[in-house]
Amino acid sequence: MHPVKFAQSEKEINACWDVVHTLRPHLEKKDYLQQVKDMQQEGYHMLYIADNDTVAAFAGYRNLYSLFAGRFIYVDDLCTLPAFRGKGYAGALLDYIHALARETGKTSVILDSGFTLHDAHRLYLNKGFRLAAHHFSLKF
């Protein structure tokens, strides 16, 4: 398996653009780098797996602390480029995040997923996640 790496430099963050844009097509490339850097200042971490010279999969997460869950890792983003799906990259990123949560004393790993993303749901269930809530949002 290819190693999990943190995207910290501008070069690494920019190398993740294609897979990020696959998950978040509303983003504009001209704003992307600065947005990730701003998010990193607020505790966002970006992980990726490269296959040869292509970033094949990425995950973004934050360490959070709440009344309902205690200390936990929240997975904001997880995606694999279509050409690289089925190779275990998303599962490897989740395994890395699970290990990191255990090593840092977190009580859980939490994520939200679009209700039509059945392949993703299968992965999450296979990794031990359980459906625990509905996510509601109100946009302005």
Image (cartoon, rainbow, N blue to C red):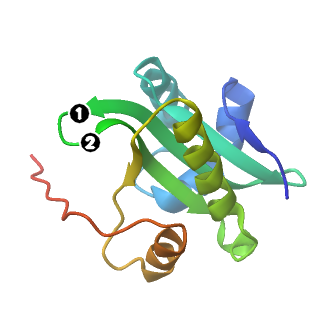
Give the tally of numbered discs.
2
How would you rate the neighbour count of disc 2 (Cα within 10 Å): few for under 14, some for 14-19, many for 20 or more?
some
Residue in the image at 64% along x and 41% along y: 47
Q: Is residue 42 left or right of residue 3?
A: left
The image quadrant where one finds the N terminus is bottom right
Towards the viewer: 108 or 79: 108
Instruction: Measure the C-alpha gap from mark 2 to mark 1.
Output: 6 Å
Q: Where's residue 75, x and y in %?
A: 44, 47
Residue in the image at 67% along x and 37% along y: 14
Q: Is residue 83 left or right of residue 108?
A: right
Q: Which residue is mark 1?
A: 66
Residue in the image at 53% along x and 56% along y: 78
Q: Secondary structure at mark 2?
A: loop
Q: Where's residue 68, x and y in %?
A: 19, 42
Residues marked 2 and 1 touching at CB (< 8 Å): yes
Q: Which residue is mark 2?
A: 69
Residue 28 versus residue 18 in the image, above or below:
above
Q: Identify residue type, mark 2.
A: Ala
Residue 126 versus residue 6 in the image, above or below:
below
